[in-house]
Amino acid sequence: MRVFKYIALLAFLSSCSLQKKLPEGSRLYAGAEVNVKSESGRGKPGEAEEVLSSNTFPASNTMLLGFPYKVWFYYTIGEARKEKGLRSFLQRKLAEKPVFFNPSNLETNEDNLENIASNMGYFTTEVRGEAVSKKYKTKAVYEVELSPRYFIKEVTFDTADFSIHSQPELIYRKSRLRSGQPYVLQDIVSERQRISGLFQDDGYYLLDANRIIVRVDTNLNSYEANLHVELKEEFREQFSRRFTIRDVKIYTSFDNPGEKRDTLQQSLSSLQNTGLLVYSTGRYFKPKVFKESIVFRQGDLYSKERQEASYNRLANLKNFKFIRNKFDIASDSSANWLDVSYFLSPVKRKSLTAKLNGQTKNNGLVGAEVGASWQNRNFFHAAENLTIDFNIGRDLQFSNGELANNFTRFDLSAELVFPRFVLLFNKLKTSLSGGIPKSSVYLSYEELNQEGLYTQTSLNTGLTYYWRKNAEYDHTLTPLYFNLVKPRNVSEAFVDQVLESENPNDLRRYFEILDSRLILGIEYKLNYLPAFVQDRWNTWNLNFGLDIAGNIASLIASKDVNSENGTRNLFGVPFDQFVKLTFETRFYRKFGDITWASRLFSGFGLPYGNSSIIPQFKQYFIGGSNSLRGFRARSLGPGTVAPQNLTGSVFGNAISGDIRMEFNSEIRYKVNDLIELATFYDTGNIWFYNENSAFGTDGKFSKNFLNELAADIGLGLRLDFTYLILRGDLAIPVRKPWLREDPWVFDQIRFGQKNWRRENLVFSLAIAHPF
């Protein structure tokens, strides 16, 4: 209680200090209160009150428990004399200029709220505002007498006007205006835009939304409205012209996108290919780049959809820093011709980038990495992107303040991305909204060395395709990938440590490292962003993954001699066989400055044939800064295995499994542009599909998996520096599945005990949100 008294005293003193700093006669604007009264029963007063409350002017200063703390910072920090410097930085991140109450805003808001209510169908609503003052703040209170709401009775279209469209039934059948709906002006605006889009996709270049009008006939007795949709009479002959594409011109070396160049003075060489006129100097692009990207051709009807698709495809090539398209109506023809011009400014073709990264994980791992990346964005002169990466890093793992393990990492990789399908699916056509498909050929070599113990090498290669059906579906298909893992430099000291270790997981990991393994597989991923859910308040997406390995290797290895232990080999190396299914969904719901974020993840790996478990680098792990934050990374599970049975590991925290179930949910409160607070709950675990000698039945997945879930709760602080979000989360476990009789441990929480804090308080420092 004494702490709360101190907080109240501090708030009182700050309030008095702020009041003295305000200009004489001025009061801070404390926001608006909107009270809606409705006696008609027609409409939704609650919805109207929510909309009206969010549309008052101006926005008040940010308050914390009724105190404008940002204004206090503004006066305490003082005015910055320079744009740069500490004071200027603090003003931008912590402070706000005071917003003072202005009596003239009452009348302005009265008119504005009446107009908004009218736009929602409450046509004769009356609003009265008054000022309510208390100490150094003044609040505006608006009393709204809500009139009965009007509903749409009938919607008609001028069939003579719209018969010029090649498919007029699309205009009528898919109308957003329906009988029985409430009158909403925004719905009418959207309907006009929809109709104009249909016309512009049908060649009517000049027929925009301003050429379409909706006449509203209201009945005061029944509170109903009849809507009639038609084309404007003014300039109808002009905007009713249907345009056809004549010339498509591409200028590939346009220096200044804001300046119109006379191409006759540029000594440009012209190439005509498939109806496209390509003018290029300096950077050379093969004609097929524009053949695949620009979907306009001579003789095509103008289409706004094709215009936007062409622009987006050029932008997705990532070869041009500026793109400008221009449409000119031909003046020398009566055939309604349009000339299309694209002015492109290429990016630098080759680049070399140095990298320096640092990382820390809550499993005691601290590391640094240096590297370089070389890129060629037009490798074969058809917008191919070649990237070569080189990285070398060092990781140290500490346990109880002492150095436990140290690793050296090295990797070299190359990836060549084609902005088209190559080898396979050449004839597959993608939709206009889907953009350009991409094909990736990659090759990488990695080494992981645990100093003085062993070195593990990995060679990866494969072919991957990326394409979009539309804005909702993203597909990734790897029809074939190859991964060869081999050990070397296995020391006697390493073998002795494993044999002497009391951790049963060490022996399992030892055999995984000692054996060379080969994976030949196929992988597919789908990212689905359902459009019907997305709006300003809701975001929802689904991810699905399927990974199948071993079938191709099994066919090739059918004639090979089986090894002594019954494992089949390919080219003298055992190959893995498994099926892996992954499902993840994320949902975000906004309530003003508060966001509710949730994630559900499930992964199921089924080893078969040559494999009793799926490969370690394909397995799932749990815990850490992006998972169950009350448990250190890779230290939880499998199943009901107790962490104390896995201590003293030669490999550090390296627990993984074939199956993973996880749910995370957190509430995020945006205090200001810099600070975000969060509270969260995590639950989940991992298991093996088969029983193994290291963990027995305790680590095997069973029908009782719900009783084996771990859980944690915690608080988070996030600092938004615009370019990155620095996140700190503090969590404690509240459910420990290895305590089988009573896994919930709320009654064991002891913040005052040092030993309890050391064993249960887990702090994570990370970049970006966890999901």
Image (cartoon, rainbow, N blue to C red):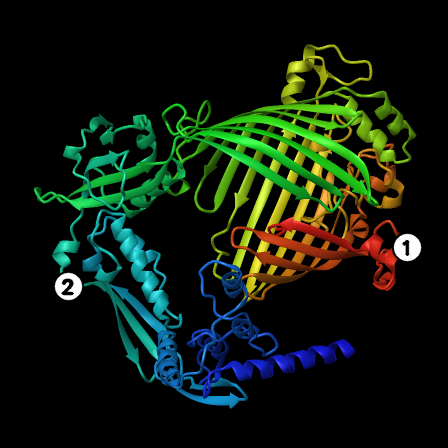
Query: Which residue is pictured at 73% across the width and 57% down the height?
Result: 730
Quick check: 685 above or below 561?
A: below
Tag 1: amino acid: Glu
Q: Secondary structure at mark 2?
A: loop
Would you say residue 42 is visible in this rendering? yes
Residue contact at pointers 1 and 2, CB within 8 angstroms: no
Horizontal relation, residue 364 to residue 85: left or right: right
Q: Earlier in the sequence, mark 1 or mark 2?
A: 2
| Residue 606: mark in rendering | none
Query: Which residue is pictured at 61% across the width and 79% down the height?
Result: 14
Residue 673 lies, in percent from the top left, at 53, 62
Q: Secondary structure at mark 1?
A: loop
Horizontal relation, residue 450 to residue 196: left or right: right
Tag 2: amino acid: Glu
Whole-number angstrom distance, CA of label 1 to CA of label 2: 81 Å
Quick check: 346 above or below 672?
A: above
Residue, disc 1: 741
> 583 or 665, which lies in front?
665
| Quadrant of the drawing holding the N terminus | bottom right
Quick check: 536 above or below 33?
A: above
Residue, disc 2: 233
Horizontal relation, residue 46 to residue 325: left or right: right
Residue 424 lies, in percent from the top left, at 46, 24
